[in-house]
Amino acid sequence: MSNLVPEWRDVDARTFRERIFPTGRPALLRGSVRQWQAVVEGRKSPDALAGYLLGLDQGGPVPLITA
């Protein structure tokens, strides 16, 4: 039995619902969040991501959980 987690690319909702979710097993979904603005900026550079996140700052505290 292989211990490798299957990789999927550019999965749409139907494929996830019909082929991945029913297995009840872990799956690596590549490209699923590539359109998220934080990901877009992070792919440009660390400074671009930092600038994007700073633009979201509303001056309040940010809850943080560490382990």
Image (tube, rainbow, N blue to C red):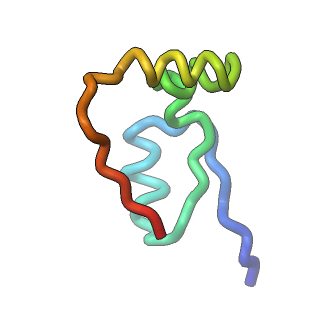
Q: Residue at x 35, y 21 (%)?
A: 56
Image quarter for residue 5?
A: bottom right
Relative to 66, say whether 40 is above or below. above
Residue 59: give x, y in percent of width and height. 27, 26
Would you say 54 lies left or right of 39 here?
A: left
Say how many tags the image has: 0
Q: Is residue 3 above or below residue 17?
A: below
Q: Quadrant of residue 50?
A: top right
Closer to us: 14 or 64: 64
Which of the two residues, 40 or 10, is positioned nearer the viewer here? 40
On the rendered image, what quadrant is the N terminus found in? bottom right
Residue 18: percent from left, percent from top: 40, 52
Residue positioned 61% across, 16% down in the render: 48
Residue at the spot 30% in from the left edge and 49% down from the top edge: 63
Residue closer to the observer: 12 or 34: 34
Position of residue 36 in the picture relative to residue 5 (left or right): left
Residue at 40%, 65% in the rendered image: 22
Residue 3 rendering spot, x and y as whole percentages: 72, 77
Q: Nearer the viewer, residue 63 or 15?
A: 63
In percent of width and height, residue 38 lies at: 50, 26
* Horizontal arrangement in the rendering, residue 42 relative to residue 12 (left or right): right
The answer to whether 56 appears left or right of 49 in the picture is left
